[in-house]
Amino acid sequence: MHGLLSILIWLPIAAGVVVLLLGERNIAAGRWLSLLATLVTMALTLPLIAAFDTTTASFQFLEHVPWIPRFHAAYALGLDGISLPLVVLTAFITIFVVIAGWTVIEVRAAQYFAAFLIMEGLMIGVFSATDALLFYFFWEAMLIPMFLIIGIWGGPRRVYATIKFFLYTFLGSVFMLAALIYMYVKAGDYSIASFQSLPLTLVEQRWIFVAFLLAFAVKVPMWPVHTWLPDAHVEAPTGGSVILAAIMLKMGGYGFLRFSLPIAPDASRELDMLIIALSLIAVVYIGFVALVQQDMKKLIAYSSIAHMGFVTLGAFLVYDIVRATGSVQGAGMGMDGAMVQMVSHGLISGALFLCVGVLYDRVHSRQIADYGGVINTMPIFAAFMVLFGLANTGLPGTSGFVGEFLVIIAAFKASFWYSLLAAVTLILGAAYTLWLVKRVVFGPVGNDRVAALQDLNGREFLVLGALAIAVLLLGVWPAPLLKIMQPTIHHLVDQAIATKIPL
Amino acid sequence: MTEMTLTWSGVAPAIAEIYLVAAICIILLVDVFAGEKNRGLTATLSLVALVVGAALTVTYGQVTHKVLLFGNMYVADELSYVLKLAGFLIVAVVLLYSRAYLETRNILRGEYYVLALTALLGIFVLVSANSLLTVYIGVELLALSVYAMVAFDRDSGIAAESAIKYFVLGAIASGALLYGMSLIYGLTGTLDLAELGAHLHSPVSMGVVLGIVFIVVAVAFKLGAVPFHMWLPDVYQGAPTSVTLFIGTAPKIAYFALALRLLAQGLGGTVDEWSPMLSALAVLTLVVGNVVAVVQTNMKRLLAYSTISNVGFILLGFVAGTQSGYTAALYYTLIYVLTALGFFGVILLLSRAGYEADELDDYKGLYQRDPLLALAMMMLMFSTAGVPPFVGFWAKLRIFQALWETHHFWLVVIAAAMSVVGAFYYLRVIKLMYFDAPAVAAPTAGRSTGVRLVLAANAFAVLLLGLLPSSLLDLCSRLIH
């Protein structure tokens, strides 16, 4: 088991470099190599799941090599209950990105696959780093391939979108870096564990909390710093949108759980209303915004923001639950919900963007008005689209239900009004998603281009089918996922409600 | 003053300077007798001279502890040893990159090489200075060589204009330096930097403060800190690119040494006096450098403002006023020089006869015309923007760390915000190279494989030092302690 995490990080990166070197002339070999690399990476996560000890909250599969001895920064990797599911999700989703781009990408295809492979390694690195400097290293490095993916293979306004994306995330991140260095100067090393146990005054915690909030709120994204996301999603190629929605947004949520809550618990307690308010605004207001979108990708992008609002809401409910019920029992339910929601949203939003990609490859339009009656010519596709649409609305039996349900219950424990507002999303989510499905899929055939549509080919069927199975499986049987997370969430609740203010 | 006795062991640590003087004389003579047809000879010989110089320095010039020579005017320590080796290496790379450019423009003259070597000699003197007098000699030797280099393409009007501008403003700065030194000397009675360091402690008299002000102004001018930066964009743009490459790289080491020897060592006891001055300069420099760079359309001018903004970061290291801060400034300077070498190397490789490749539009679609150059440029750009996995990230990180250690909260915030502004114009260049269609379809000239290899190594070093930064960080730390 030792060294497996390193392999998960560096195998895709090495494969990406090889694909890049093979170049456009050997693109056939490049494609197969990319697919092989992603499949092997996914296969290598299976022993991790099998060997994962679900009775402990401590990090497992540890690796520790001194990296910069002078700074006491180490190449330190490990997984716990909240990072393992995200690593598996990353490995899982990237396979479909490679398959989905198989023939669709015609210009600079070798670089396209290389960029996604390198991204995969870096993203796994973000989730498995247990050293803050290493975490930041991967976190920032990831921006480079994504910047190029949107900028090279994106739509007409790709340059605007990609520069906006880069600068927004960079702005958030540099302040996080400043906070990390501050804590290093106090703690003497960069391990996340020592940051978590470092005593900090309330004033320090507030500043650190704000710095983290800038970084993670941009990434999630939370209202009002969400505006880069619709642009980036609309302009990005299908694969880019999938990775953005399915994985990169999760890093914000992961950051809140890994950094904000355990490192600045007192500031989190003090400022939890801020996060809850922003989350509820995202859920309700952005839901309305999604309702009026004309562009399918933009609609799904806004839907992502609303759904990610559930993640941040769930993560920060813990204090109000403790206040309202006076007990730690069940305080972690919001976090449970947040984690399930992250995994589930990764699958559903990825699938929805792939659905849009299927249509876009045929019609070259993302406008809802250009479609209508797709079910008449693409019945199999329509079935998938309806399934993922329903999952997006949180239909019981799909993964979307589990996360939202847990968060709403937790919100109810904290305050009736939270749950009322959060539950509005069930109505709004159903409204915008089902209306989208109705306008695109159902009704009479809208125009000649729709009439000429071909149904899914084998490759597309494989991709959507696999995601559909995952969505349903997680929906009816979320227990294994919850079991993996349980000890870590318990530990996290303990950390979050403890105080770190030195006496 | 101790009695001077000239023995080999007594001067061996100064081997680099002694050798270089001899080499310059020989090259001057060879150049005179080589005639117009054998201009390449001077170029090759200079390169050989640099390699031999580095070898001699390693063999004889290595010092394990601080050695004072020539009546304590000259110091040889590990810092000066390493910086001299770096000087040899940087100038060698500069000469390699520039040769093709000079040839295609018919300005492959001996002057360029001889002046580059005398400038290097000035750098060495400055790096090893232990007296105000030695500092001044080093500054002038370097500055005069560089003024002449800017003007050496005598048919170019814009180069002559830049040279005049540089010379006049540089002369004012030299005057300020000398005036500040004279004030300090008059009030303390010593030129020796070590003695100054031992005796000058805050609080100091108004006269000393005045002297410090003039010295800070001179240092700020030499580094190109706002508001003493006016010469820098004009000189960068006006000088032949091969000269800009020289100005933008090797002298930065010397000016780091100037700031270190004067402020940190000679005036180390008065850090409370000059640190606030530098912090005001640093903030101005960061803001002006980054914001003005955003609107540039000329690549050399853009890089000039990028230099200015990087100088802001170097100054921040000095603002901290601690060992850790100086280490950060040294590390930042070395990384900056490494990156700048690559930047101008790309411009030089792209230019052809009658085509300077210095407008930003010349970089449109570079990826399609020359993937290697585009990739190298992209790595260098991301590095300077401070994005991991490239080495520029560590340079910025090191500065932030030094600032936190000395509780400069607002400086951290300003520097962080300004590095985001900086990222914008670096991204713009990458956008031109990777996202835009080429304006001219012609592929770049395919020749000069050797130089391309050097450039590839240069860019790769930026990545490698970014992945494994430990050794260089340790080295810088050791040199300062």
Image (cartoon, coloured by chain):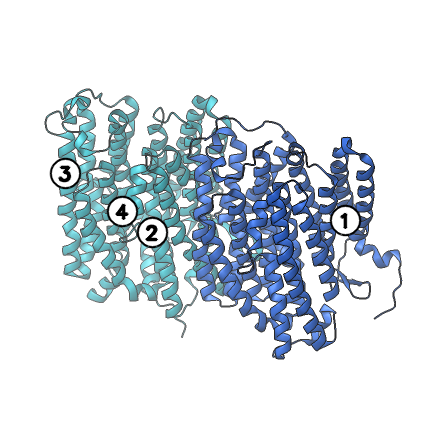
Chain colours: A cyan, B blue
Q: Which residue is mark 3?
A: A434
Q: What is the C-alpha distance between the residues marked 2 and 4?
A: 21 Å
x%, y% of residue A206?
Answer: 36, 66
Q: What is the C-alpha distance between the residues marked 1 and 2?
A: 51 Å
Of callouts 4 and 3, the N-terminal one: 4
Tell me the mark number nearer the camera, choosing from 4 and 1: 1
Visible residue check, residue B188 = yes
Tell me the mark number nearer the camera, choosing from 3 and 2: 2
Q: What is the C-alpha distance between the residues marked 4 and 3?
A: 23 Å
* Residue A16 marker: none
Q: Which residue is mark 4?
A: A340
* Residue A218 marker: 2
Tell me the mark number nearer the camera, choosing from 4 and 3: 3
x%, y% of residue A317?
Answer: 25, 59
Residue at mark 3: chain: A
Of callouts 2 and 4, the N-terminal one: 2
B348 up-or-down from B117: above or below: above
